[in-house]
Amino acid sequence: MAPTDHGTGPIEAVHDPRYLHYLESAWTEWQALGFEHPLIPDTFPLSRLLDGRLDAVAADGTARAMSGHFTFDTATPLVAGTYVAARASANCALSAADAVLAGGRFAFAACRPPGHHAGRDFYGGYCFLNNSAIAATALRSAAGGRVAVLDLDFHHGNGTQQIFWDDPEVLTVSIHGHPDRQYPYFTGRAEEIGAAGAEGSNLNVPLPAGVDDHAYLAAVAGASDRVARFDPAHLVVPLGVDTFVDDPLGDFAVTTDGYARIGRRVASLKLPTVVLLEGGYAVGAIGRNVASFLRGLEQG
Amino acid sequence: MAPTDHGTGPIEAVHDPRYLHYLESAWTEWQALGFEHPLIPDTFPLSRLLDGRLDAVAADGTARAMSGHFTFDTATPLVAGTYVAARASANCALSAADAVLAGGRFAFAACRPPGHHAGRDFYGGYCFLNNSAIAATALRSAAGGRVAVLDLDFHHGNGTQQIFWDDPEVLTVSIHGHPDRQYPYFTGRAEEIGAAGAEGSNLNVPLPAGVDDHAYLAAVAGASDRVARFDPAHLVVPLGVDTFVDDPLGDFAVTTDGYARIGRRVASLKLPTVVLLEGGYAVGAIGRNVASFLRGLEQG
């Protein structure tokens, strides 16, 4: 089914207004400065530059000056169609949430661009709007109750963690390559459990290279137990298939059959579930790996 | 005169030991990871990623994972000779300080790489060790008294500001292109006056595009008045000639004759003065512009 337009309301419920204004206007401003190449920042506001108080400084420079304020990497070009594409992707996520709210056992949204690296007021890792956080917030808003986000992408869901860091009503779980070795670095350690007042509402499962179906399923089983104890009304699964054995970026070894078993394990939670597409760089294999996961989910 | 080796002591008096270890070892570790191209980070620890507490997180990943922790831009490649060159440059600064401590009215060090964008534990803007901060600290250590740093590079001396931010005994002054428009962005505003307990020990003079000799000299006069009131025992001048009218990066319009007048104005402070070379991108004109400044200083 085609997604429906949900407007800006559900997005503004997650992201900072100044950030959304930047996303919407940066390309036009960038062009007005005379640039024609994709906007990729080259200078970043390291917090030690002003004793950790830098983010409190007025961010009122040009797109050239401020671009590093709104992202954490140089891998995510901002171009003419970025904002429109990100909005469309968020609409996919919201439409999948609608389908589950309407009584569907699960729904899948083929979101592009992905979302889990986008924080409340920053982008990165090809992500601009956090589709999972937007869907989770919409589910809570419409139906009440707690929501759990179980991030099965190869990379740490750093944006989702940041958005819900101090929210005890949203459990964020991420299984990923250890940040000492893998993007997005810096965050994703087991010690990060949530802000004061929300301790235990964030669970990171950083893993070594080489994780196969068996090891990955063990991690999913542990994470699922935590989700079950949290007793959410809904589950959101940002699904990356960059855990695949042939993925050129990831260093895990999950197989196509493995995805079906993972899907069955997730289904055993018996929760209304929204699945959203995240990463996957063995492009020719994305379709069959996602389909395998969804078949498992359906059979579970 | 050739610089003399001052060892690591005067450098460790300014920079964080873990940062120095990183500078010394990063290239070797980078090569061991199989990389042959210059080390340029692509992922940065935006403080909002972990509620501003990210810098407190253990920085114990690989050079690949941690590189963004130690710099704020992608313009500063770290290569095989970086650490050795930066040490040699710091030795130039320290040797110039020696010459002034031995009774010279002023001394000039042709430092390369430059230094004023390097902070206590980060590099950037082609700077790895903060030569001015190292010289200023050595002057204080050897002779006591206050020191003033008058930064005449086109760009904000963000590293020097950071290093002395909470030190009321070192006055840091920087005259530069406004950070809303010019690198290094984010810092360099007039509101940045020093930490609690050191208010007034930092003075930023951000200027619009097009500043000519007259306007620049007015800024230097104001800055010099502040230096005089601070009553320092020594003056350190990080001198960039990227304020030059033909500089391809800067947007000021100082002339070769203008540098002589600026030098005379600085000399009127009647302070033992260490001048250190910072930026300048009209490469063919660096020599005559620096010589013009030094002749003015000598005549003043």
Image (cartoon, coloured by chain):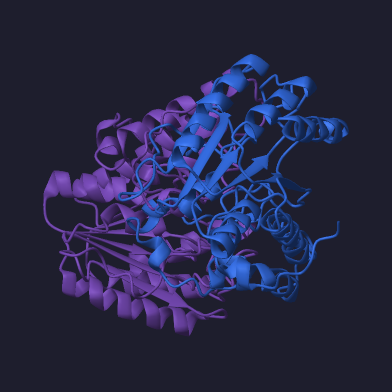
Chain colours: A purple, B blue
Name the residue at 48% across, 42% down. Answer: B231
Question: Could you tell whether B289 is left or right of A154 in the image?
Answer: right
Q: Quadrant of the C terminus of chain A?
A: bottom left
User: Would residue B131 be visible to someone looking at this image?
Assistant: yes
Position above or below: B193 against B47: above
Residue B227 position, x and y percent, is 50, 37
Position above or below: B250 against B136: above
Residue A205 position, x and y percent, is 39, 75
User: Would residue B180 be visible to someone looking at this image?
Assistant: no
Question: Could you tell whether B224 is left or right of B250 in the image?
Answer: left
Q: Which sits in the foreground, B160 or A218?
A: B160
Report the residue that reaches farthest toward the right.
Answer: B284
Name the residue at 37% across, 44% down. Answer: A55
Q: Quadrant of residue B131?
A: bottom right
Question: Could you tell whether A178 is left or right of B290 in the image?
Answer: left
Q: Quadrant of the N terminus of chain A?
A: top left
Report the residue that reaches farthest toward the front.
Answer: B103
Q: Which sits in the foreground, A245 or B284?
A: B284
Name the residue at 35% across, 56% down. Answer: B52
Q: How many marks?
A: 0
Residue B80 position, x and y percent, is 79, 65
Residue A24 position, x and y percent, is 43, 27
Name the residue at 23% across, 59% down. Answer: A272
Report the residue that reaches farthest toward the left.
Answer: A144
Q: Which sits in the foreground, B4 or A150?
A: B4
